[in-house]
């Protein structure tokens, strides 16, 4: 068996791939957080619960309606996005003009409610979700075995992240969004419906989280608390990257996933804390974050 | 106070001097009520309320008087619980030394976390404290001395100063009450001191406090360490009272609970966190048998408070009476 740095190559590349997949989730989730924060000035604590809702919607579509993975990939972000729009209209819109910390507290409370309801309904143990038949099996690359589904997750996440980046940076809609992030009053004066844009942006960010949840369902078990710890790691990712740049969120997300994967190979005990340690170091050297602008 | 009095002009600051008389009366009333409370309520329940009340008061010192929302205060509470438990059980420390040691551990941890976290403000500060606390949680999950999922159990209560046998609940209660009152009065003294006035100035307008020549970061860090130490005092006492230190004490749900207690009672009020702690602890007792309804109800209270009840119970009461409480 070939070895690299004293570690069997398949193990190394296997963890690297798992790191990339985790990184993909960090990237999609921190991207959604950054987009929402840009326009609403709210850190969406419900994001982890909404990621979990995406996975559960996929599970419910399959087990209750007989709709498989591909339908879930389309419908779950849509359905969860609609709940997001309701949350924004009914609750978050009322916080306009208040200290931003109230948004954090409100979304934290919502996360508790949603996670509590799902735990009451489904219990705390995970539910299995099968990999769709089209993506079963894998490729033997010679140095490692690459499961098709995992390759798919990495590719599709990258595609979604880049598409989001393109829409925000290169389209007219995106330019409205960027303008409203800078100065909502002025943009509204130009005749653009900013409140509607805020609502749709929140819905979109939530839909991204649900999309990540569907992608995650076949890899991890579908469980009510699957997003609870994840969201804290994503917060650390956001602090490391800074929320100033969309591309920054993507790069930081994938990069930290890979670093975490490598840590799992060389020093397994530290793998759950490495991202937080990196956050502490970044705070010391560059408090605004790697891609952030000093405020 | 005169030389440093100017920043007090920023924002709604409590009037000095005899404007505080009603608060002194309220404190005396509270102490008297707590002294006779074990005649009507279970001492163990009351001790739980007092430990969490002190914890919530310590948390409130940061959010209410410096404007810093820490979402990681469980780190200090839980660290102190483990430290007190380990010191009392493994090293055989008497209870007073175990709790002091625990408080010192939390203060030291507060120095490190605070030093990192005050580099950012607002929402980032909340996320950083949450992330640092989560890091510590994962560390305790694996560390050998914490007992992992089991925690440290059967921590001896011991004898206070070698004399008072704390295994009697009532004796323990008096000690906890004394600890609580000492911590509470320290916080009360702090927020009405010149130091406290500067903290409020920072809360109201940080750039202005900087321009007045205050070293804002130093004030923030000192307040953070004080808050961490007092959270530790609460956590260490809790470990001795309930003879248990576990992962629950360091989990992010604990950080969320202390935020909720302060919010329900009233952020930035003197008595709010105590009332909030009593409400939330009672609620947990009543809903204990109902599975995850506790989480749901707590979440709903969060939402309701933020939407319609931002002053909290004591804040609303103070508004009705026209006096800050």
Image: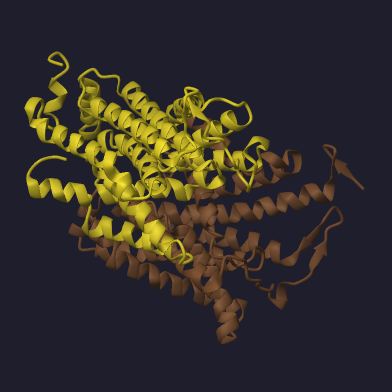
Chain colours: A brown, B yellow
Q: Residue furthest bottom?
A: A65
Image quadrant where residue B6 sits = top left
Indicate the position of residue B17 as horizontal and vertical percent values: 9, 25
Residue sitting at x 41%, y 57%: B285
Left or right of A290 on screen, residue B151: right
Indicate the position of residue B89 as horizontal and vertical percent values: 60, 32
Q: On screen, B85 above or below A197?
A: above
Residue sitting at x 22%, y 30%: B200
Viewer-side residue, A146 vs A7: A7
Viewer-side residue, B188 vs A292: B188
Q: Residue furthest top?
A: B3
Q: On screen, B225 above or below A143?
A: above
Q: On screen, A13 above or below B220?
A: below
Indicate the position of residue B20 as horizontal and vertical percent values: 12, 31
Left or right of B38 on screen, residue B236: right
Q: On screen, B282 above or below A281?
A: below
Figure quadrant of the C terminus of chain A: top left
Image quadrant where residue B58 sits = top left
Residue A128 showing in the rendered view: yes
Indicate the position of residue B145 as horizontal and vertical percent values: 65, 35
Residue B109 showing in the rendered view: no
Q: Number of labelled discs?
A: 0
Left or right of A73 on screen, residue B64: left
Q: Residue furthest right?
A: A1
Residue sitting at x 20%, y 20%: B212
């Amino acid at each position: 068996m070939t070895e690299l740095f004293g570690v069997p190559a398949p193990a190394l590349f296997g963890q690297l791939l798992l790191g990339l997949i985790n990184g993909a989730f960090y990237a999609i989730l921190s991207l959604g957080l950054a987009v929402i924060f840009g326009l609403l000035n709210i850190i969406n604590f419900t994001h982890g619960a909404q990621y979990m809702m995406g996975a559960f919607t996929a599970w419910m579509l399959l087990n209750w309606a007989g709709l498989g993975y591909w339908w879930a990939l389309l419908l779950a972000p849509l359905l969860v996005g609609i709940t997001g729009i309701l949350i924004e209209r009914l609750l978050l819109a009322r916080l306009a003009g208040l200290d931003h910390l109230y948004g954090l507290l409100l979304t934290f409370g919502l996360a508790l409610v949603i996670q509590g309801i799902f735990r009451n309904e489904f219990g705390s143990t995970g539910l299995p979700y099968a990999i769709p038949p089209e993506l079963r099996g894998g490729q033997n690359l010679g140095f490692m075995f690459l499961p098709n589904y995992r390759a798919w997750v990495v590719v599709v996440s990258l595609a979604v992240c880049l598409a989001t980046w393109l829409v925000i940076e290169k389209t007219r809609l995106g330019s409205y969004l960027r303008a409203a992030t800078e100065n909502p009053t002025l943009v509204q004066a130009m005749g653009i419906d900013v409140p509607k844009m805020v609502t749709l942006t929140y819905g979109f960010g939530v839909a991204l989280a649900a999309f990540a949840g569907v992608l995650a369902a076949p890899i991890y078990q579908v469980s009510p608390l699957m997003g609870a710890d994840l969201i804290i790691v994503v917060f650390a990712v956001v602090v490391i990257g800074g929320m100033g740049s969309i591309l920054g969120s993507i790069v930081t997300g994938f990069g930290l996933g890979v670093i975490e994967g490598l840590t799992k190979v060389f020093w397994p005990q530290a793998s759950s804390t490495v991202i937080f340690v990196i956050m502490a170091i970044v705070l010391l050297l560059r408090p605004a974050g790697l891609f952030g602008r000093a405020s | 106070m005169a030389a440093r009095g100017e920043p007090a002009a920023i924002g709604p600051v409590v009037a000095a001097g005899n404007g505080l008389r009603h608060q002194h009366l309220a404190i005396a009333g509270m102490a008297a009520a707590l002294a006779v409370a074990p005649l009507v309520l279970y001492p163990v329940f009351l001790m739980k309320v007092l430990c969490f009340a002190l914890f919530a008061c310590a948390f409130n010192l940061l959010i209410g008087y410096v404007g810093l929302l820490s979402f990681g205060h469980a780190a200090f509470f839980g660290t102190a619980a483990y430290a007190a438990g380990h010191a009392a059980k493994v090293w055989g420390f008497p209870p007073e030394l175990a709790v002091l040691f625990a408080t010192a551990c939390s203060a030291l941890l507060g120095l490190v976390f605070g030093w990192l976290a005050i580099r950012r403000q607002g929402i980032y500060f909340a996320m950083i404290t949450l992330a640092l606390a989560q890091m510590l949680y994962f560390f305790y999950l694996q560390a050998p001395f914490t007992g992992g999922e089991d925690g440290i159990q059967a921590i001896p209560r011991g004898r206070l100063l070698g004399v008072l046998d704390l295994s009697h609940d009532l004796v323990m209660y008096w000690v906890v009450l004394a600890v609580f009152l000492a911590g509470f009065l320290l916080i009360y003294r702090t927020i009405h001191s010149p130091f406290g006035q500067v903290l409020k100035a920072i809360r109201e307008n940080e750039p202005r406090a900087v321009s007045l020549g205050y070293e804002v970061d130093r004030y923030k860090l000192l307040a953070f360490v004080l808050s961490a130490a007092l959270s530790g005092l609460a956590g260490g006492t809790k470990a001795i009272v309930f003879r248990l230190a576990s992962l629950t004490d360091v989990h992010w749900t604990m950080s969320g609970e202390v935020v909720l207690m302060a919010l329900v009672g009233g952020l930035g009020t003197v008595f709010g966190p105590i009332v909030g702690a009593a409400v939330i602890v009672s609620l947990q007792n009543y809903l204990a048998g109902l599975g995850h309804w506790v989480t749901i109800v707590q979440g709903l209270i969060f939402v309701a408070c933020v939407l319609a009840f931002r002053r909290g119970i004591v804040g609303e009461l103070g508004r009705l009476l026209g006096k800050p409480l």
